[in-house]
Amino acid sequence: MKKYTFLISILLLAICFIACKKKNPQREETKKTITEWMGKTIVFPNDVSCTYLLQDNVTDDNCVTDKPFKIFLYVDSVGCTSCKLRLFDWKSVINDADTLLPGQVDFVFYFHPKNIKELTLLLKRDRFEYPIYLDLEDKINKLNDFPKNSNYHCFLLDADNRVLSIGNPLLNPNIWNLYKQVISGKIEPEKKNSNTIVTTDKYDIEISKLVVGMK
């Protein structure tokens, strides 16, 4: 009996060891996404107009600024629109940026809604007084082919629209803290050449942990 108990214990330990060695799919997805997108340039369509509360057209000159950083959010038509938008929470992030990082970061929102009326009601309900891009034909996604996972539809960009960091600050407050550190210069991505921006290993690992922590 003791012999069998010992063998079972060994078998269980072996199973646990194998299970621990297995790769975490979510972490592997994160690493793959970071490798693919870090330093990549986001291409913006030149024929998608800015809109304020979906009523008054705003010229591109009113939306495009010369600030050194952008936080870009793409929202597609899949799933619950209000759950993805969280406009009230974005207002808090924008206010925080205006207070702590004045003149440093602009927010660029591209929406590809499945229901314009629903989007209009959400914008009005949350009094989202910030210009958005209403991309009815999903042109920006066709140009860039964003990841299927909507967790990776938010990017911190530099002045040339190159990706410095990935992740939605509403899904994990630590991501917003990381963005603020990059914008303030406390963490600086390393430029290897004029076309590519990569990060240090420590920075890359930190982003991986943060994005995996999103819920």
Image (spheres, rainbow, N blue to C red):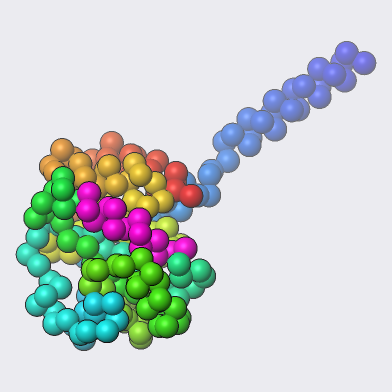
x then y, percent, for residue 91: 29, 58
Q: Is the residue 119 above or below the residue 168 in the image?
A: below
Residue at position x 23%, y 40% in the image: 200
Residue furthest to the right:
1
Residue at position x 53%, y 49% in the image: 25
In depth, the one of 201 and 154 nearer the eye is 154
Q: Is the residue 21 above or below the residue 172 in the image?
A: above
Query: In the rendered image, is residue 198 in sight?
Result: no
Q: Is the residue 73 above or below the residue 52 in the image?
A: above
Query: In the rendered image, is residue 200 in sight?
Result: yes
Residue 101 vs residue 199: left or right? left
Asked whether residue 60 is drawn in magenta, I would say: no
Residue at position x 53%, y 44% in the image: 24
x then y, percent, for residue 175: 32, 46
Residue at position x 35%, y 44% in the image: 173
Q: Which residues are magenta?
A: 83-96
In depth, the one of 130 and 103 nearer the eye is 130
Q: Quadrant of residue 116?
A: bottom left
x then y, percent, for residue 161: 18, 64
Q: Quadrant of residue 75?
A: bottom left
x then y, percent, for residue 150: 43, 63
Residue 30 vs residue 11: left or right? left
